[in-house]
Amino acid sequence: PQLLLRRRPASAGAFALLARPASSASGGLPPLTTEIHPGIKRGAFSQLTDADVSAFEAIVGGDHVIKDADEVLSYNIDWLRICRGQGQLVLRPKTTEEVSAIVRHCNKRRLAVVPQGGNTGLVGGSVPLFDEIVISTSRMNSLLSIDPVSGVLVAEAGCVLEQLDREAASQGLMMPLDLGAKGSCQIGGNLATNAGGLRLLRYGSLRGTTLGLEAVLPTGQVLDCLTTLRKDNTGYDIKQLLIGSEGTLGIITKAAILCPARPKSVQLAFLGLDSFQAVLDTYRLARRSLGEILSAFEFIDSESMRAVKKNLGLSCPLGEHSFYVLAETSGSNETHDREKLDGFIESVMSMDGCATDGTVAQDAGQFAHLWSLRERIVESLLVDGYEYKYDVSLPLADIYRLVEHMRTRLDGRVIRTAGYGHLGDGNLHLNFTTPKFDAKVLELIEPHVFDWVRDRRGSVSAEHGLGLKKSQYIRHSKADFAVRVMAEVKRLLDPNGIMNPYKVLPDE
Amino acid sequence: PQLLLRRRPASAGAFALLARPASSASGGLPPLTTEIHPGIKRGAFSQLTDADVSAFEAIVGGDHVIKDADEVLSYNIDWLRICRGQGQLVLRPKTTEEVSAIVRHCNKRRLAVVPQGGNTGLVGGSVPLFDEIVISTSRMNSLLSIDPVSGVLVAEAGCVLEQLDREAASQGLMMPLDLGAKGSCQIGGNLATNAGGLRLLRYGSLRGTTLGLEAVLPTGQVLDCLTTLRKDNTGYDIKQLLIGSEGTLGIITKAAILCPARPKSVQLAFLGLDSFQAVLDTYRLARRSLGEILSAFEFIDSESMRAVKKNLGLSCPLGEHSFYVLAETSGSNETHDREKLDGFIESVMSMDGCATDGTVAQDAGQFAHLWSLRERIVESLLVDGYEYKYDVSLPLADIYRLVEHMRTRLDGRVIRTAGYGHLGDGNLHLNFTTPKFDAKVLELIEPHVFDWVRDRRGSVSAEHGLGLKKSQYIRHSKADFAVRVMAEVKRLLDPNGIMNPYKVLPDE
């Protein structure tokens, strides 16, 4: 039975920061990051003084300088609760000018800083390691403009993605990116990490959809590239350096995003398949049958599905399968879209060795529920205890071979080896869980998993970034000379190295 | 009467380099660029010696070192024939290693170079000014790989766009960009200038569709970022600096491009309209009715149409109108696409003050002919004599106001003030013609037209780049500090300033 629903509810499947499991792997606070990475030494930065704090209070006002240790703690711990920094101060500026004044002071005084948005990153990039000062963008949360004709939305960095999408919806538009963390993540952080997400397949990367950017560079100077023009070939595209720099080249303060028209019709098929080859075949069919309306193609393996069912109590409408696929369409004509989806499902079901079972969302509730089976996997795995999280790009043929290879390698040592991700982007999320952190397991995973990916010319970070956790593996995916150029760019823009140190680039 | 055709012929409307008018404005050779820009002084570069030439012959072989003055001449003159440089040597390397060896030598010896692809640029960026050595990429023209499943094409820089599109077609794919010069322009030049073109509206910019790049930097070092992965968040995206740098930061040698699926059905509607407001209203209707299958929306004013008809003898199937619109669809289902186009045309025709006349291409010949009315405008204007060419981005409401404003300003002094372009991108091509170069006319145009655009927060170069002709106007569209950062990046990558000097960045 098939029934179409008109629009994906903006809040479908969002996980809020509050929804994360109250207890971490160790049952309380995660260990200090410096204990897990004893090799990293504090840079030659100054120590914070009372005079510094007074200077910051003069800039942002006393209410927005957080010194209380309990309050500061949540800014020191990442969402996965695998990193804990030793920051002592959090600043919550309201304007670009305040960010600029803060950073100018820090640069002069050689005080290290960490920009922080929604703190939903998964590679330890958004929290301090030592005593870096946290600059939170949360109060910079105004939508500045939205033009229904050109589709351009201009917003401050601290705007939450889901809220922006709601505003876009009111103008017949949508944000070109969507990800599980949308209820908490901020657009500034999305840009700083070049977030990919569920619909990159259709709407492309933020490198194409970001028209303009304003940022405070590590010297405190304001880089104003906040154009709203679709085309502007006047000089080098400096803003691209900021996109994906994970806060190491500056703090993004505003952005202009090109929003596509909100689809009039959205449909979701959920299929059960019994081999990874069937997943690949189904993807090929989807591209052919659904063409320009295909807006997402996600796969989930049985181990991931078991985690969502057991750890979160979610129900799966299909029986047991090795794999599940979510194929979503977004289009402008419900009748046409429905015909295309019918055609796709007919082909899939009639093709030998392809899907064996399937359903189509019949209402907004089912739609949200099916998506939650995919979007809440990361949350469900945390319930197991400790999560070892990887995010790689690979040629399609190799994607699931890595999961099987690692499952064999870790047999008997982990609760779960789970693989899922964005098939259309060649992007695998690979996860292992143990009751507690197990150094021996980590040793079996790293650097082996990175080597395996490198040997197949994949990327050791498809969309999560390098952050603290993967910076030493950058050369697995980038040539030596390219890394040297990056280091030179870093030195050029951040001569004192105060901006999010220890992240992205490897030790020299 | 409507009939659909299945695919746009790859060669439709292409202009070849040979097609350009044999005589220029002055009836023979264009004046030396140094005569037109006497203010620009030669940089402190070395003079070419016989020893240099021998060194180059050892690298690329004697056959590929061009010294003959007549042969060198065509590399000194741009396609519009408004620039003539004084280069004495052209090198035609075959491999990245040869390019690297050449540039390494030039950097050590402080010899200035100009990278040159198809030499179809419109801002004087691809030809020498003084005696810069031309490094032509024409012999680096191998298609390296093309993957029908992932859609990724890898090619050397000298591959001609139209040929790549033909190769893509054989795998069910298409190049994500298309422009009038496709029969001559090379993919390396397209990337170096961040070419926009006719279908950016649908497939986005090269910043999103370029997955990987290889380039020789001004020191001769090879920057290898030639990944074919759709997602790769491992460090800064250095390749974005090369895209749109117009050959001032290095020579692009290879690229990996993500190609969309080739549409199964392509349709083209050609409409006559009697006001610019009607053009805007028609665009809004097209976005609503055609949704995800809209692949181009181009407008042509009556003056441009007159030039194409009179100067090239092309016929227009519609009567006289103030404006003409080409609305193209590309989709995966002919029946659905046709229904959508029918709906669009019905809405347009029934809406008061909208289109008054229209036709739909009924076969490949008509399709190619209708496109040629748009693609050959630039060529038709050259026939008038001398062409003053501008390419700006503006808010939609201001686009045609600029044409009307300039027409009034230049009344009686020019043959034509013609406006056309990519409406969906807010991109106007604004052109003036006189029988011969007229300094007084130029004075009336510049800087006035740039000031007008700046005052409306537009871009003084939407897609053509700054090259030599607009570099002094970069601050009209970019903040002072952004230009300073660009200059610092230039110094970082090109410490001796040998790579395409006098272009893009203004004099210090």
Image (cartoon, coloured by chain):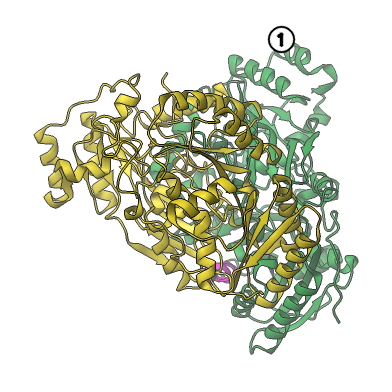
Chain colours: A green, B yellow
Q: Is residue B344 left or right of residue B381?
A: right
Where in the figure is residue A70, as x and y percent of width and height? 83, 30
Q: Secondary structure at mark 1?
A: helix
The chain ID associated with circle 1 is A
Bounds of the magenta segment = A397-409
Q: Is residue B20 left or right of residue A37?
A: left
Number of residues whose C-alpha sits closer than 10 Å to that of mark 1, classed few (under 14), some (14–19) or many (20 or more): few
Where in the figure is residue B344, as x and y percent of width and height? 74, 64
Q: Residue at x 76, y 62 (%)?
A: B349
Is residue A408 in the magenta section?
Answer: yes
Q: Residue at x 32, y 58 (%)?
A: B141
Q: Residue at x 79, y 81 (%)?
A: A319
Q: Is residue A103 left or right of residue B21?
A: right
> Of residues A295 and B80, which is closer to you in this image?
B80
Relative to A284, residue B32 above or below: above
| Residue picked out by circle 1 | A51
Quarter occupied by the N terminus of chain A: bottom right
> Of residues A66 and A13, which is closer to you in this image?
A13
Q: Quadrant of residue B325?
A: bottom right
Quarter occupied by the C terminus of chain A: top left
Q: Amino acid at mark 1?
A: Ala
Q: Is residue B206 visible?
A: no
Is residue A419 in the magenta section?
Answer: no
> Of residues A101 and A346, which is closer to you in this image?
A346
Where in the figure is residue B67, as x and y percent of width and height? 14, 42
Where in the figure is residue A496, as x and y percent of width and height? 53, 22
Relative to A143, residue B379 above or below: below
